[in-house]
């Protein structure tokens, strides 16, 4: 019970908000990239017959990235609320997230590597 009565510093609340804003910034960035990919792939699918198959693949990858972006925004909001409640109640941690940031990084790196590999294969004439 003594641990629940500890003093919470104001900078902890600001750190929680800063973390939330960073997650939302990444979510919006990834969402913007995926929206641009969707727009370009839609144009390519309609007007460039030689790139129709690749446009479908890029569209699928963009939709996956859009889903990741939405999931990140939901996670950021949920995590912000959870941490804010813990700070209000002056609870001891844990205030860190260990699994999800690593999982999201791996999924996004895989997406970017797929795009890079496809571009490299196109430039080398393998497709």
Image (cartoon, helix red, strand yellow):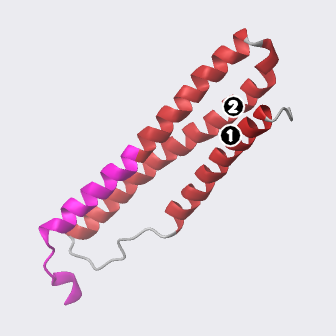
Q: Which residue is mark 2?
A: 58
Q: Which residues are magenta?
A: 1-25
Q: Secondary structure at mark 2?
A: helix
Task: Please report whichever mark, 2 or 1, sits nearer to the chain's N-terminal start.
Answer: 2
Estimate the x, y position of residue 105 in percent, counting from the top left.
55, 57
Which residue appears at 72% of the width and 24% of the height? 55
Estimate the x, y position of residue 23 in percent, counting from the top left.
39, 51
Which residue appears at 52% of the width and 62% of the height? 100
Which of pointers 2 and 1 indicates the residue nearer the eye?
A: 1
| Residue that sits furthest to the front in the current view | 124
Q: Which residue is mark 1?
A: 115
Determine the image quadrant of residue 6.
bottom left
Task: Left or right? Give the position of 118 relative to 91.
Answer: right
Q: Report if residue 50 lies within the magenta region.
A: no
Q: Looking at the image, how many numbered discs can be counted on the residues?
A: 2
Which residue appears at 74% of the width and 39% of the height? 120
Which residue appears at 55% of the width and 37% of the height? 66
Q: Looking at the picture, does residue 76 appear above or below residue 96? A: above
Task: Left or right? Give the position of 37 relative to 123.
Answer: left
Q: Looking at the picture, does residue 55 appear above or below residue 24? A: above
Q: CA distance from mark 2 to mark 1?
A: 8 Å
């Amino acid at each position: 019970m003594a641990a629940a009565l500890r003093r919470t510093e104001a900078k902890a609340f600001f750190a929680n908000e800063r973390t939330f804003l960073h997650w939302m910034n990444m979510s919006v960035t990834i969402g913007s990239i995926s929206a641009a990919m969707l727009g370009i792939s839609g144009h390519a699918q309609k007007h460039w017959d030689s790139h129709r198959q690749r446009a479908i693949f890029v569209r699928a990858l963009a939709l996956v990235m859009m889903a990741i972006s939405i999931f990140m925004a939901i996670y950021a909001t949920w995590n912000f609320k959870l941490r804010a409640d813990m700070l209000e109640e002056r609870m001891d941690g844990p205030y860190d997230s260990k699994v999800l940031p690593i999982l999201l990084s791996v999924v996004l790196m895989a997406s970017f590597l797929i795009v890079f590999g496809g571009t490299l294969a196109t430039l080398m004439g393998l497709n």
